[in-house]
């Protein structure tokens, strides 16, 4: 079974981007975020999501969950807040950074277990789990670095602090997902045309 997603409408995407930005602003200011208006059934359905933050073209935070365990709009709000304040690779986002912050949302399909040779770099996001360790790459990572399948799987092992060939182990669990990826940069480009 191949992973799949029904795409959101442009209005639903814009609403999720606004939810993410409003949530980040509220958490940086230490205020509660307002509940969004105009929620659709797709946004109220449970969903899994990652939110990536960029500033001046550089990654500034990325947090999410593979588990679809809360309404999509709430998952976006929580991931956006966590990406801004809790990514251990970066200091918390400051108020002065908010105007230049680019938000990218990756809405995820369910995970589908596969053999490693079924991984399609650039199309699939990949999760590798073995010996109590797990690492994940979103679909957009492999093309960004020009990775082929084997390089992607080796890099996934490195991210999980596993031996580089752990993806070949019979006990290793490789799963794939697809993602609907959109950002406020896409919205700005669309309005500038």
Image: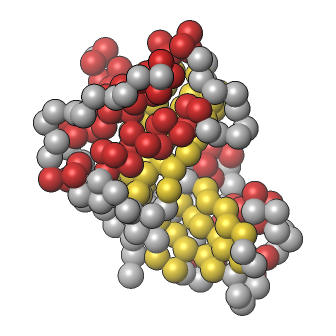
Q: Quadrant of residue 116?
A: bottom right
Q: Nearer the viewer, residue 117 or 99?
A: 99
Q: Nearer the viewer, residue 150 or 6?
A: 6
On screen, residue 70 versus residue 92, left or right, reads left
Q: Nearer the viewer, residue 12 or 125?
A: 12
Figure quadrant of the C terminus: top left
Q: Quadrant of residue 56?
A: top right
Does residue 171 lie above or below 72 as drawn?
A: below
Q: Residue at x 30, y 59 (%)?
A: 46
Residue 191 location (% of width, % of height): 27, 18
Q: Residue at x 47, y 22 (%)?
A: 30
Does residue 74 lie above or below 126 as drawn?
A: above
Whether residue 154 appears in this view of the structure is: no
On screen, residue 132 versus residue 127, left or right, reads right
The extreme front residue here reads 31
Figure quadrant of the N terminus: bottom left
The extreme top residue here reads 96
Q: Quadrant of residue 135?
A: bottom right
The extreme bottom residue here reads 170
Q: Residue at x 24, y 57 (%)?
A: 45
Residue 33 location (% of width, % of height): 34, 29
The extreme right residue here reads 163
**Which colouring convention does the figure follow?**
secondary structure
Number of marks in picture: 0
Residue 185 location (% of width, % of height): 42, 25
Residue 128 location (% of width, % of height): 65, 70
Q: Residue at x 31, y 51 (%)?
A: 72
Whether residue 84 appears in this view of the structure is: yes
Q: Nearer the viewer, residue 79 or 176?
A: 79
């Amino acid at each position: 079974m191949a992973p799949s997603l029904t795409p959101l409408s442009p209005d639903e995407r814009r609403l999720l981007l606004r939810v993410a930005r409003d949530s980040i602003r509220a958490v940086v200011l230490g205020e509660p975020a307002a509940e969004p208006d105009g929620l659709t059934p797709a946004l109220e359905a449970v969903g899994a999501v990652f939110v990536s933050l960029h500033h001046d073209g550089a990654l500034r935070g990325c947090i999410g969950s593979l588990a679809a365990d809360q309404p999509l709009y709430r998952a976006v709000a929580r991931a956006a807040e966590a990406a801004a304040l809790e990514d251990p690779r970066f200091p918390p986002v400051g108020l002065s950074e908010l105007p230049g912050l680019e938000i990218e949302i990756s809405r995820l399909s369910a995970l589908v277990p596969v053999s490693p040779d079924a991984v399609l770099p650039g199309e699939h996001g990949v999760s590798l789990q073995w010996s109590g360790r797990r690492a994940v790459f979103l679909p957009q990572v492999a093309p960004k670095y020009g990775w082929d399948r084997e390089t992607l799987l080796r890099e996934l092992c490195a991210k999980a602090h596993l031996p580089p060939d752990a993806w070949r182990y019979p006990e290793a669990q490789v799963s794939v997902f697809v993602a609907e990826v959109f950002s406020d940069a896409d919205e700005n480009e669309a309005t500038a045309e």
